[in-house]
Image: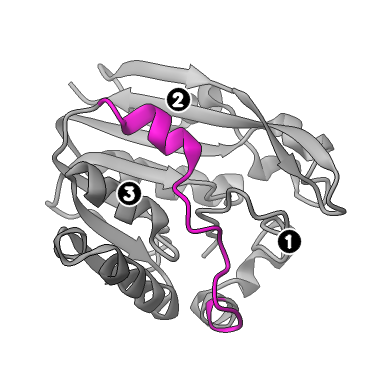
Amino acid sequence: MTQQHDHENDPAHEHGHSHGHQQHHFDQAFWDERYGSTAAVWSGNPNPQLVREVADLPTGRALDVGAGEGADAVWLAQQGWDVVGLDVSPVALEKAASHAAAVGAEVAARIEWRQGDLLGWEPEDERFDLVTAHFMHLPADLRRQVFPRLAQAVAPGGRLLVVGHHPADHETVRKDFDEHFFYTGDDLLAELDLDGWDVETNTAPEREMLGADGEPVTIRDTVLRVRRP
């Protein structure tokens, strides 16, 4: 399935991802090959919106969706969260486990790595105090199937944090994307069944990154954080 994660400070992070008419090709085999083709696909740093939105929250049990090479899960564990890191690629998860072990045994012990494809994933009866998904861009019809399942996995009083490219990025770094891969916080709220949930963050902050040719560009992140009653 489509995944991108932990891409900060990587000027090439936007290229070769699973978007547009090619989406069906980007399955486990694609991601295994990509993660196996280089020492590190991503920067190794946690996504900045995760840090901003979660740093002051009380810790508990977290689900990191599309864990990739594990930077976000490791950061959460360092803050005291018990984390399940979910990714379609076992190659990525092997790298993530190595990353966590290199940080330290205490951090590694807080993380459980799980392989799974969100297109068929169901939360069942498991619940988390935090469910976080960063830069997972799916066709709108698939997004409407997958993202409600993320909300289902949130425990009472817990939070769902979704971060993605704002539609404005279609005119900057992602002109090759189909416009339906982008979303605002309001789009997500309309698609999710969140009756009674508290909207704690619904913003689109700007930040600087390097474009395809190394030039600085300004992009916007859609950031939605909601709390289940």
Across and down, in percent, residue 155 comes to: 15, 37
Q: Which residue occupies 22% across, 26% down?
A: 228
- Please name the residue that numbered disc 1 is placed on: 15
Disc 3/disc 1 C-alpha distance (Å): 25 Å
Nearest to viewer (mark 3 / mark 2): 3
Which residue is at 78% across, 44% downward? 173
Viewer-side label of 2, 1: 1
Residues at badges 2 and 1 in contact (C-beta under 8 Å)? no
Residue range in magenta is 35-56
- Closest to the camera, between mark 3 and mark 1, is 3
What residue sits 31% from the left and 55% below the top?
74
Which of the two discs, 3 and 2, labels the residue nearer the N terminus?
A: 3
On the question of residue 51 being in view, the answer is: yes
Horizontal and vertical percent position of residue 120: 37, 64
- Label 2 Cα neighbours within 10 Å, binned few <14 / some 14-19 / many ≥20: some
Instruction: Specify the label residue 81 is tagged with.
Output: none
User: Where residue 75 is drawn, which disc sits there?
Assistant: 3
Residue at 23% across, 58% down = 84
| Quadrant of the rendering where the C terminus is positioned | top left
Nearer the N terminus, badge 2 or badge 1? 1
Residue 64 visible to an observer of this rendering: no
The one nearer the camera, 88 or 92, is 92
